[in-house]
Amino acid sequence: MEGRTVLELAEELQLRRARVMGAYRIELAGFSDTMRDRLRTYGLFAEIISWKLRMFVPTDASGVAILSKALDCCPIERISGREAA
């Protein structure tokens, strides 16, 4: 949540911090339509923003367990950094 780190996961997924409506969130990017239901069962939630479906990990106390489930399924393959804007 605090930096510019991007976690590259299996199945070409990425976890990264995103600023949405003035708040920082943890976004899961790169998912396919067939992954949506599975990711929702883990506890990720979806929002349509600018006509695009985006998925996020909750940032409350439940987020740690949800993130753990997602990482069990799609382990980290690489850690990289984002360029400053």
Image (cartoon, rainbow, N blue to C red):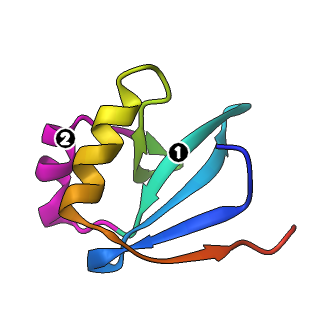
Question: Helix, strand or loop at disc 1?
Answer: strand
Q: Which portion, as a residue range, is magenta?
A: 31-47
Q: For residue 57, what is the image quadrant?
A: top left
Residue type at mark 1 is: Ile
Q: Quadrant of residue 11?
A: bottom left
Q: Amino acid at mark 2?
A: Tyr
Residue 5 lies, with reference to residue 37, above or below; the image says: below
Residue lying at the far top of the rendered structure: 61
Q: Which numbered disc, 1 or 2, marks the residue that appears first in the sequence?
A: 1
Q: Residue at x 17, y 61 (%)?
A: 35
Left/right placement of residue 34 relative to residue 29 reads left
Circle 1 sits on which residue?
Answer: 26
Camera-side residue of 16 and 73: 73
Image spot of residue 71 (x, y percent): 29, 57
Residue 79 image offset from top left, x and y in percent = 56, 74
Q: Residue at x 73, y 61 (%)?
A: 4
Q: Nearer the viewer, residue 35 or 59?
A: 59
Q: Residue 22, position in %: x, y?
A: 74, 31
Under circle 2, the secondary element is helix
Q: Which residue is mark 2?
A: 42
**Mark 1: few/some/many CA within 10 Å (<14, 14-19, 20+):** some
Q: From the viewer's side, name the closer residue of 5 and 47.
A: 5
